Amino acid sequence: MRPSTRSLKPEQRAVLEATFDLKATPDSFLTRRLAEECNLKPRQVQVWFQNRRQRLHKRKRPVNTTSPSAAEPPAKKAAAEPASSEPERSEPVESESVDSEADPCSPALTFYTDDFGAELPLLWLDELDVGTACDDLGSETETTINSPAPQRLDAEPHAFAFGSGEHLSTAEMLSLLELTTEPLGR
DNA sequence: CGCAGGGTGTCAATTACATCA
DNA sequence: TCTGATGTAATTGACACCCTG
């Protein structure tokens, strides 16, 4: 709302928002990629996503001061507990972000809209070199993208595995992203 | 095979700053 | 002008996982 001097530029935020809408927890490669595209430090991108997730959580369930421990189990382990049935993990990727926040401030951003109805910032989607698209996303998703391998693929339930490979079509990429996140419902 | 340490990532909480009413 | 509320970027501390020796 307020364009604070400390805030990121609208274009940068638009890219991050759009990406967040599809993937709330980007892996290291995607983080670097976004940092590159947005002219930010990877750390900044990381922090942005972190804060974004935090904001989303707080909005969804406002801090209940009544019984914090009762309603919220340890929750610490959720950080690196991908396969577990953490309800929170799947939620942050709802809609809300792009529609309500990115839109008004994304003048120069070009989005790709596929038959899926999802929008992606072309800048990074176009350049993702994806190799082997795994058909079976249910348990072990392994998409290979031509770039340095992230350290912790398992950090996410359906993480991508970067290695080497060919191009994945935009539609395939989108479908992967769609499957790795909640349905956008747009 | 089991264990310890390093590296990495996430989350929750917190801080610092900017802006607005 | 001052103050409180709000939003955002960044930091800190704890925890969990993977990899390696």
Image (spheres, coloured by chain):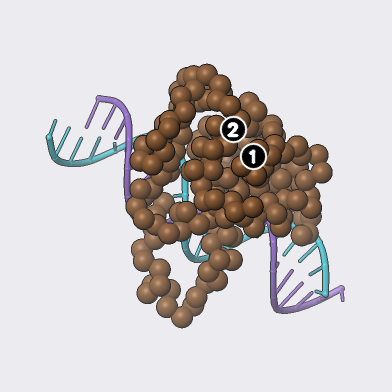
Chain colours: A brown, B cyan, C purple
Q: Which mark is residue A115?
A: 1
A89 and A67: which is toward the camera: A89
Distance in Å between CA atoms under marks 2 and 1: 8 Å
> Disc 2 residue type?
Ala
Q: What residue sits 69% from the left and 39% below the top?
A: A113
Q: Position of residue A163 (x, y in %)?
A: 45, 23
Residue A155 makes an appearance in the image: no
User: On what subunit does the disc labeled 2 rest?
Assistant: A
A178 in relation to A186, above or below: above
The residue indicated by pointer 2 is A171
Q: Residue pushed farthest bottom?
A: A66
Could you tell me which quadrant the N terminus of chain A lies in? Answer: bottom right
Left or right: A16 in relation to A87? right
> Disc 1 residue type?
Asp
Q: What element carries label 1?
A: loop
Q: Residue A57 carries which label?
A: none
Q: Dot 2, crowdedness within 10 Å: few (<14), some or many (≥20)?
A: few
Q: What residue sits 77% from the left and 55% below the top?
A: A4
Between tags 2 and 1, which lies in front? 1
The reply to whether callout 2 and callout 1 are in contact (CB within 8 Å) is yes
Q: Position of residue A33 (x, y in %)?
A: 60, 32
Left or right: C7 in relation to A51? right
B9 in relation to A173, above or below: below
B2 and A143: which is toward the camera: A143
Q: What element carries label 2?
A: helix
